[in-house]
């Protein structure tokens, strides 16, 4: 009997033995698939006489996703292939989003860096012929700093107080209406804010025909809903346990908000305010309606026309000659640098004020 009984366990290493580990593609496989897709797309583009490299890139993207799925499904199975395709689509979307941003920054730097120097940053366009090189952006920088600064002084406190009301005190119909109108104001075009201030400031009150302060009022309208929304979200992230612990000690509600809630969320609130400032720094429509622009330096935002960086770019581009185009690109680079500095400051403040993880 023992001679006829066969061992049911297959010998190790035979084809029937179960695999302890599934097969995996090597780490370099995505790079190899991408290189093959690029080479195939270049061949297809050259063979089809496609002159646009964007078309070549889109063909390579399609081939990369299809090749990733086919090769992974054959080696690792369909389930892993679907996961790899999803990962490929995420990376592809990231690349598609970065390419226009890189192109924008690269073009602005290449066309504007040659214009920026000490003279460009320290002189205005007063008594400068637009068809000749020369002049600068100093008066527009002053106007932007003053107009954005006044708008921030107006909008930041009102926006933060509104957010505190909505989160800490707001209940019932009034809070719902305030939230609704904040959402509506978030999406209004900048030209509408300019028209509103134009009708109030010029028509109803009969004020002076142009001033930087009028433009600041329109910018404050655009900035306020952004501050409200960002501050509201940051206050909602503060744990309720902190509020309850403070109230349990007998601390009044207002003091709990000032001493506990706001210090906890100050990093996120500051970041939101900085992003709101960056959002209004590039607005030109309200400035064109309310400030009118000026070629001379005007340090008084309450009287007479005043320029700004966005309006200066628009004004120079409309001149229609190469020196003006160069000045427009230089001002655009200055404006981008200004916004980048604001975002960098916001990130540094957020990291500085972020709660430290305890050991």
Image: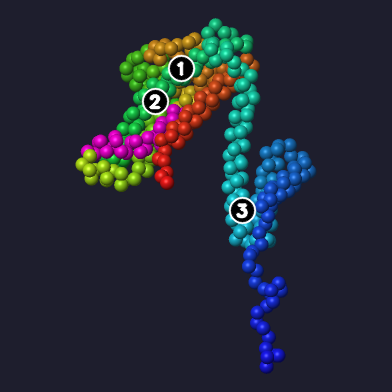
The figure's colour scheme reads: rainbow
Q: Are marks 3 and 2 in contact (CB under 8 Å)?
A: no
* Residue at left offset 53%, top offset 23%: 335
Q: Which residues are magenta?
A: 252-279
Q: Are marks 1 and 3 in contact (CB under 8 Å)?
A: no
* Residue at left offset 63%, top offset 65%: 21
User: Of the numbered discs in the image, which one, if any, rests on residue 143?
Assistant: 1
Whether residue 265 appears in magenta in the rendering, the answer is yes
Whether residue 269 appears in magenta in the rendering, the answer is yes
Q: Quadrant of residue 98?
A: top right
- Give the prevailing secondary structure in the magenta stretch: helix
Q: Quadrant of residue 257?
A: top left
- Number of numbered discs on residues: 3
Neighbourhood count class around disc 1 (C-alpha, 10 Å): few under 14, some 14–19, many 20 upward: many
User: Of the numbered discs in the image, which one, if any, rests on residue 152?
Assistant: 2
Q: Earlier in the sequence, mark 1 or mark 3?
A: 3
In the image, 337 versus 60, the foreground residue is 337
| Residue farthest along the left direction in this orientation | 250
* Residue at left offset 69%, top offset 52%: 29
Q: For the residue labelled by badge 2, is the local secondary structure a helix, a strand or a loop?
A: helix
Neighbourhood count class around disc 3 (C-alpha, 10 Å): few under 14, some 14–19, many 20 upward: some
Q: What is the CA distance from the residue labelled 1 to the residue labelled 3? A: 50 Å
| Residue farthest along the right direction in this orientation | 47
User: Of the numbered discs in the image, which one, if any, rests on residue 341?
Assistant: none
Q: Earlier in the sequence, mark 3 or mark 2?
A: 3
Q: In the rendered view of the protein, which quadrant contains the N terminus?
A: bottom right
Q: For the residue labelled by badge 3, is the local secondary structure a helix, a strand or a loop?
A: helix
* Residue at left offset 38%, top offset 39%: 234
User: Of the numbered discs in the image, which one, if any, rests on residue 85?
Assistant: 3
């Amino acid at each position: 009997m023992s001679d006829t009984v066969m061992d049911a366990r297959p010998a190790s290493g035979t084809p029937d033995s179960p695999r302890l580990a599934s097969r995996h593609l090597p780490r370099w496989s995505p790079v190899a698939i991408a290189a093959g897709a690029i080479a195939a797309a270049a061949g297809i583009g050259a063979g089809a006489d496609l002159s646009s490299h964007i078309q070549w890139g889109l063909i390579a993207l399609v081939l990369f996703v299809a090749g990733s799925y086919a090769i992974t499904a054959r080696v690792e199975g369909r389930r892993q292939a679907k996961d790899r395709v999803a990962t490929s689509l995420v990376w592809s979307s990231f690349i598609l989003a970065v390419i226009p941003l890189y192109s924008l920054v690269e073009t602005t730097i290449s066309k504007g860096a040659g214009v920026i120097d000490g003279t460009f940053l320290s002189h205005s366009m007063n008594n400068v012929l637009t068809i000749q090189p020369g002049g600068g952006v100093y008066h527009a920088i002053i106007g932007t700093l003053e107009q954005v600064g006044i708008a921030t002084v107006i909008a930041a406190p009102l926006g933060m107080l509104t957010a505190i009301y909505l989160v800490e005190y707001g209940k019932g119909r009034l809070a719902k209406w305030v939230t609704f109108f904040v959402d509506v104001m978030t999406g209004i075009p900048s030209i509408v804010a300019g028209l509103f201030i134009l009708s109030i400031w010029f028509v109803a009150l009969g004020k002076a025909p142009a001033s930087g302060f009028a433009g600041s009022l329109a910018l404050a309208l655009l900035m306020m809903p952004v501050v409200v929304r960002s501050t509201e979200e940051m206050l909602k992230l503060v744990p309720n346990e902190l509020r309850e612990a403070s109230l349990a000690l007998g601390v009044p509600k207002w003091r709990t908000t000032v001493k506990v809630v706001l210090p906890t969320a100050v990093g996120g609130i500051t970041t939101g305010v900085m992003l709101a400032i960056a959002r209004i720094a590039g607005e030109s429509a309200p400035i064109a309606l309310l400030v009118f622009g000026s070629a001379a330096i005007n340090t008084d935002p309450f009287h007479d026309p005043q320029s700004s960086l966005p309006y200066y770019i628009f004004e120079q581009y409309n001149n229609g000659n190469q020196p003006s185009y160069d000045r427009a690109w230089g001002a655009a680079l200055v404006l981008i640098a200004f916004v980048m500095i604001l975002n960098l400051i916001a990130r540094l403040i957020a990291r500085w004020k972020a709660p430290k993880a305890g050991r």
